Amino acid sequence: MTFRNDFLWGGATAANQMEGAWNVDGKGPSVPDMCTNGSLNSPKRLTAFIEEGTLYPSHEAIDFYHRYEGDIALMAEMGFKCFRMSIAWTRIYPTGMETEPNEAGLAFYDKVFDCLKAYGIEPLVTISHYEMPFALVEKYNGWEGREVIGLFERYCHTIFERYKDKVRYWLTFNEINSGTMPMGSVMNTGTVKGCSGSVFTLPDDPRARFQALHHMLVASARVVRYAHEHYPAFKVGCMTLMATTYPLTPDPDDMLKAQQAMNISNYYTTDVQVRGAYPYFAGRYLREQGIEIRTEEGDEADLRAGTVDFISFSYYMSVCVTSAENENRIGGNLLGGVANPYLKASDWGWQIDPKGLRWTLNELYGRYGIPLMVVENGLGARDVLEEDGSVHDSYRIDYLRQHIREMREAVEDGVDLMGYTPWGCIDLVSASTGEMAKRYGMIYVEKYDDGTGSLARRRKDSFFWYKKVIASNGEDLD
Ligand code: BGP
């Protein structure tokens, strides 16, 4: 048993973290365009207005907008079969509220898809990747406003029709389950109207966040159903941040705590998107949090009718939880926990757990039984660019190798795995910290945290290694 012949090897990115050209050709501002740069110890800030003289990393990012042809050529050189990217909603509808789309924005993605096609690379498009139009935050408190469902549907109908012959694989929302986590308010649900300051300490209103999440789930289901009805060749997936959570000890209290964390953080949204209804445990959780979700007639039917074709997820790390006092806290992508004594962590404190990926694949496949795809995975690290332009990132190769091995084990276990697109195949802006220093790519980009850099691209050692991996369909991992 090995990876299937049509396995989608590739890499993953998001518009706001790489395109730049934030106000070019009619594009409107999105939430990340209003976020400054930061670092692990100095969080990025959300600002209510663009501050003169402040660095906003999404504004130029790595300038994929003007360099996409060269970047896609490099991906093709690695042998990519698939490229995960997102469309910036604000290129198509600059405030999210226009009735007619922005033709220049649509034309840009036509060019990108045509270029991918010329190399035989299949696009996998995230429709909304952490970049809600800022105007919708100001007007509706983001997704808390029910009106946003219709606006999102209009956006989806536009891009489905425009790109129906160019894109087959779609994901509705990136890491939609981050809406169950406090940081999800700024990244995902956009429930931050009138807020400014460090993104780690913005006021968070769980009631607004869960209400917003309900609207996102309804919107997702409606567009999935619409896609199935109008474009039968489309495959539409959900995208979940897999916050794999272990009990720190076999204490039954820890066991229960881990189960509850898995339920709320991971399955609350995935159950809706795959099974078409809120899970049995949602009621008690919401009640105990004092959250009452306003629904409308038709919502239940919408959720039932718009279930996804496959599950995609990000996997970087695992965390432990315990009911006992424990000082040993660790961070992570949106969700922290306590440290696992058996694991080492990256420089940003994300615990490295390749076996946890096999566990996660089995867990998801056992629960849902539909095809899976790992659409984010990787090691954020500080790379050193040598004078001759090389980058010796053996630590990244080790990380990826170990995770691919565990995916192979999962396939042998019987899991139906469609593909693998490691995160940030080309260096780009970090979503959580806004910095360039946290690099994931196989392609190095000469861009630095003070905004300087020639933007030149360089092949890292991992570039040549990954090329071999793809050419051998995951057999040659040396
Ligand atoms: C995921 C996001 C990505 C991304 C990645 C790595 O949560 O979907 O957009 O950037 O994590 O996180 P970071 O950039 O914070 O290191």
Image (tube, rainbow, N blue to C red):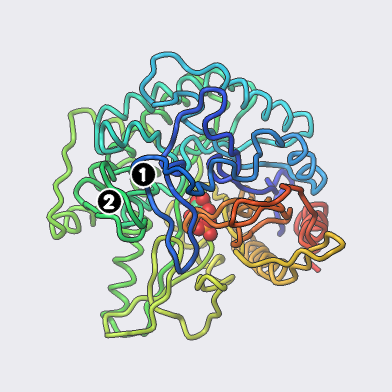
Q: Is residue 233 left or right of residue 363?
A: right
Mark 1 = which residue? Answer: 275
Residue type of the residue flagged with mark 1: Arg
Residue at figure coordinates x 79%, y 34% from the top left: 119
| The C terminus lies in quadrant | bottom right
Any mark on residue 279, and which? 2
Measured as percent of width and height from the top left, residue 262 is found at: 36, 63
Contact flag, marks 2 and 1 (Cβ < 8 Å): yes
Q: As shown in the figure, which amino acid type bears the numbered disc 2?
A: Pro
Disc 1 element: helix
Identify the residue at image location x=32%, y=76%: 255
- Determine whether 95 is above or below 366 in the image: above
Quarter of the picture containing the N terminus is: bottom right
304 relative to 438 in the view: left or right? left
168 vs 251: above or below: above
Query: Looking at the rendering, which quadrant does residue 460 occupy?
Result: bottom right
